[in-house]
Amino acid sequence: METNSPKPPKEGLEIGATGAAAATSASENPISTPKSNEELSIREELTAFAGWCGKNPLAIALFTGFIGFFVWLYGFRDLFLNETASVTQWLWFWTLDGEQEHGRMVPFIALGLIWMARHRLREAAGKGNNWGLLGVGFGVLLFIFSVRSLQPRIALAALPFFLLGTASFLWGNRVARLLLFPACFLFFMIPVAAISQATFDLQFLITESVGLITRFFGIGVQAMGTTLTATDGTFNFEIAEGCSGIRSLAAMTMLTAVYVHLTQNRLWKKVVIFGASLLFAVVGNIGRIMGIVLAARYYDPEFAAGIMHDYSGYVFFPVAVIAMLVFAKLVNWAGDFVERRLGGEAAVAGGAQ
């Protein structure tokens, strides 16, 4: 009796060959392999956005209308200063003051943060949430109140609510959460009238601190009010508003806010580092004034009041930044150490049970 050994099914061989061919084709044609968000070029991102616009005409119409209305309302509608200036013109006028000029950079930094998060924003985009209209409505109420009270600062405070509410309504709460920090960062753009009082207080703080240091080391300098005077009469420095450190204070708070947002993953670390940066700005400026005093006392008062005064800020501000980075390292090391200790104690307690 003749026995036939079972043959493998032909279809299986064909399927295997087809799979191998497909694998070979995929390896030879990498363009066909789906790309991750990180690998997309700007052209591909624009193409994907155009495709999204085609699929969501209502959303893009609402978004475009909001942008147009926002530009007109904030940029061209004269509502303040006796109806001679828009919000943007008023802000530009305020930021001509050297203590407030950092406000011009804020929108561009916020846009940069949004651009850096564009891949996560695309992945998070989903169905819109109608509750986002509450945020937009609250922003509208703030803007109306700003017009009625003639306070453009309140109109600027409405911007984060407009942004977050619109994002939530069009793309959902996940996108709004990702935009939370860039939106809140816009608050740095609001000029603070009380900054003049803070400048005055800082003048006294720095003068008293430098006077205390010079007395401790026996340096012949007397501090009185906002004046530093050599005991031998060789120099007499007035700590002016520009020397109070308010500019470095504003710059450090903005810089630290961005730094902790991008590098820290725990809320308590962000709060601790951000709070300490205020101290770093003050300490850096005290070091700057102290350096000028030492140069005047032991080298040349004219050099100290001239060249060193004009360029010392470029030295001591980086020192404050380095101090912030070192402090952040210490905070992270201390946090990791405490977590390891607590984890080890929890493991020992679990083993004992």
Image (cartoon, grey):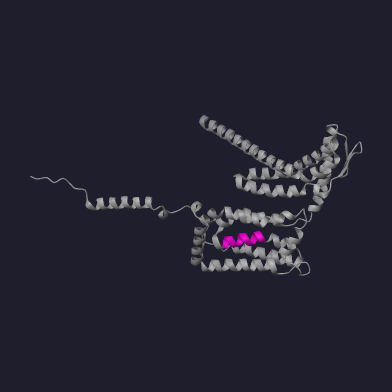
Q: In this view, does 33 lie to the left or right of 282?
A: left
What is the x, y in percent for residue 203?
83, 46
Give the quarter of the image for residue 140: bottom right
Front residue of 84/29: it is: 29
Give the quarter of the image for residue 281: top right
Looking at the image, is 326 positioned above or below residue 192? above
- At x 57%, y 34%, the residue is 340
Q: Is residue 188 left or right of residue 209?
A: left
Q: Which span of residues is magenta-colored? A: 159-169
Q: In which quarter of the image is the N terminus?
A: top left
What is the x, y in percent for residue 322?
68, 40
Give the quarter of the image for residue 80: bottom right
What is the x, y in percent for residue 134?
62, 63
Front residue of 334/88: it is: 88
What is the x, y in percent for residue 284?
75, 41
Front residue of 79/222: it is: 222
Looking at the image, is 325 positioned above or below residue 50? above
> Principal SS element in the magenta part?
helix
